[in-house]
Image (spheres, helix red, strand yellow):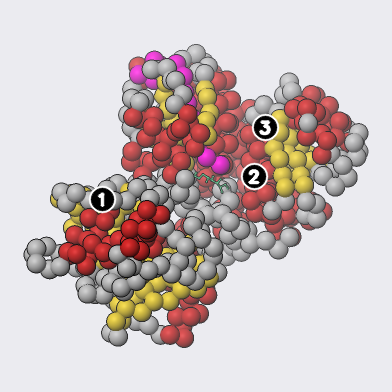
Amino acid sequence: MLDGLKRLEYRGYDSSGLIVATNKGFEQVKRTGRVVNLEEALDELQYGGNLGISHTRWATHGDVTEANAHPHTSSDGKISLVHNGVIENYVGMKQFLEKKGYTFQSETDSEALSNLIAYHYAKEGRASGKNPFLEAVRKSLRHVEGTYGIAVVCPDFPLELIGARKGSPLIIGIGKDENLIASDVNAITHCTQNVVYLNDNEVVHMTNADFSITTVSSKNVEAVIHKVDWDTSAAELGDYSHFMEKEIFEQPVSLQNGMRGRFSDDSSTAVFGGLNLNSQELRQIDRILFLACGTAWHACLVAEYLIERFARIPVEVEYASEFRYRNAPLDKNTLVIAISQSGETIDTLGALREAKRKGYRTLAINNSVGSTIARESDGGIYQHAGPEIGVASTKAFTSQIMICAMLALYLGRLRDLSYEDGIQIVKALRGVPEQVGQILQQNEAIAAVAKKYAKYEDCLFLGRQLMFPIALEGALKLKEISYIHAEGYPAAEMKHGPIALICENCPSVFLATSGEIFQKSLANVQEVKARKGKVICIATEGCEIPDNLVDDIIRVPECHEIVKPILMSIPIQLFSYHVALERGCDVDKPRNLAKSVTVE
Ligand code: M6R
């Protein structure tokens, strides 16, 4: 379980705990802080057993305390559970249970569910001939409003484990003489590669030898076993200091993997296997709506530029969390595309479901094979970037852009994009891994630049057109891992307000690429310099930048328009990484964040 928790620590890391069925009964340990604190406590306690549940927490209800850490045990000691998600009606549940004599030790919503299961378990008795533990779990879940991925144990059934999900992911791992439940395949790929993806409102009951799935309303469900063919070492640090560093340096390979087998024989277009839409249907699409959160939302903004430019299809981009409650009118020929690295982000999943409910065709661009978003969309494109563990998304972002560039090419070639343009684009995309490798060789030079700017508390990222989303991503990367206040703006928009921030202590990172807009970008740099702002310029080779106009310059190779967003992303990732290191921040586990956000 500790191995699994460490592999899952990127999902939450403010406290952790576990409960084990030992030969002296169920023993529980919780610690605040990282999983290593739990490990140290366990080294002393020397617990051993064959069944248990464990959890690493990202706080939703209540402070980071041992009392609020999971597992949560009912006040009669009969039920312990770990829970991801939010029980929305827990206040009413708690009031009801308090009247029945149950007491509460924590401020969490999860404890209400453990007491509710205990209440039903006490009522159930053994008379019915059914398993009272399983019956109690199912009955309780029928009363839950909100989301859950749970694992539950009961000391009266020390060989049995129950799991259930609604809204939060849960998978079953089928091992040799052992069975497992986890909220992410990463947690168990070192034990087994055979998994079953549980669907919403399903409950699994298992022993080490067997398992069965039913719905919350007690209907039998047939399990479909999938093989996860991930290289387990891909989720390990190897010789790198941080996952973020490892994943930045993996980009030549992750980008190559995203392209593998996806170009036509004549190298003039892309080909995708899983769209589940034929060419004729795709030609009828007259609008595309992209939905995502965070970094994936920035990839959508890049997609907007690329698809409008190369395929001439109008594109809109919405924050998934806004779209799902906005009831936006959509045209019937709208294709909805959700982008999500994890495939489990609850806001993106909710928005996708809302689009499906309204009858729109949906696709997902996703990095996690078998994730909920991948399974629930009508078709999709896997990124094949390999597991991303660092909380700050890096290789997943560039791979999402790569997929969107290929999609722009594919849709363009189904319409007006010429054969010759297609050939040029494929050539440019194929050259990306090598060019990214060249930029990565500047790591030390970029680290030296980062060192100079790590002391500032504010920073602007400015770029025009295709560089605007990269500016947003640069600001997000810097703020999430170094806690520097950073903002991304279209460079020309700066003079409508943010220019007030410019001073000696607020540096600006300019993203300038060759092309018709370059001189205008340069004019924006002048505006910053005129106000004593320090300027770091990331520019493509060949952009002529007058001496003394910028304080530091980082160059990326000259390239086709379509690949600029990928190449320009690499320096901002390295810059943020080194600034955060310089400030002594925990790069892979920044404060308050979690890798996949499975609560609204
Ligand atoms: O797994 P997803 O791509 O759906 O995640 C979306 C965001 O939570 C994620 O990109 C987040 O913004 C990252 N921390 C950014 O580095």
Coordinates of residue 239 in the picture (x, y in percent): 57, 65
Determine which residue is flagged by label 3: 467
47 over 58 or under it: above or below: below
54 over 21 or under it: above or below: above
Q: Secondary structure at mark 2?
A: helix
In the displayed structure image, the side of residue 423 where residue 101 appears, left or right: left
Is 37 a magenta residue? no
Q: Earlier in the sequence, mark 1 or mark 2?
A: 1
Amino acid type of disc 2?
A: Leu
Residue visible at 26% across and 75% down?
Answer: 155
Determine which residue is flagged by label 1: 142
What numbered label is drawn on residue 394? none
Whether residue 337 is visible to the viewer of this picture, yes or no, is yes
Q: Which residues are magenta?
A: 281-294
Q: Dividing the image into 4 quarters, which one contains the N terminus?
A: bottom left
Q: Earlier in the sequence, mark 3 or mark 2?
A: 3
Amino acid type of disc 1?
A: Arg
Q: CA distance from mark 1 to mark 2?
A: 40 Å
Neighbours of disc 1 within 10 Å: few (<14), some (14-19), many (20+): few
Q: Is the CB–ligand 1 distance for label 2 below 8 Å? A: yes
Is 289 a magenta residue? yes
Q: CA distance from mark 3 to mark 2?
A: 14 Å
Determine which residue is flagged by label 2: 476
In the displayed structure image, the side of residue 516 where residue 333 appears, left or right: left
Whether residue 401 is visible to the viewer of this picture, yes or no, is no
Q: Report how many numbered discs are placed on residues in the image.
A: 3
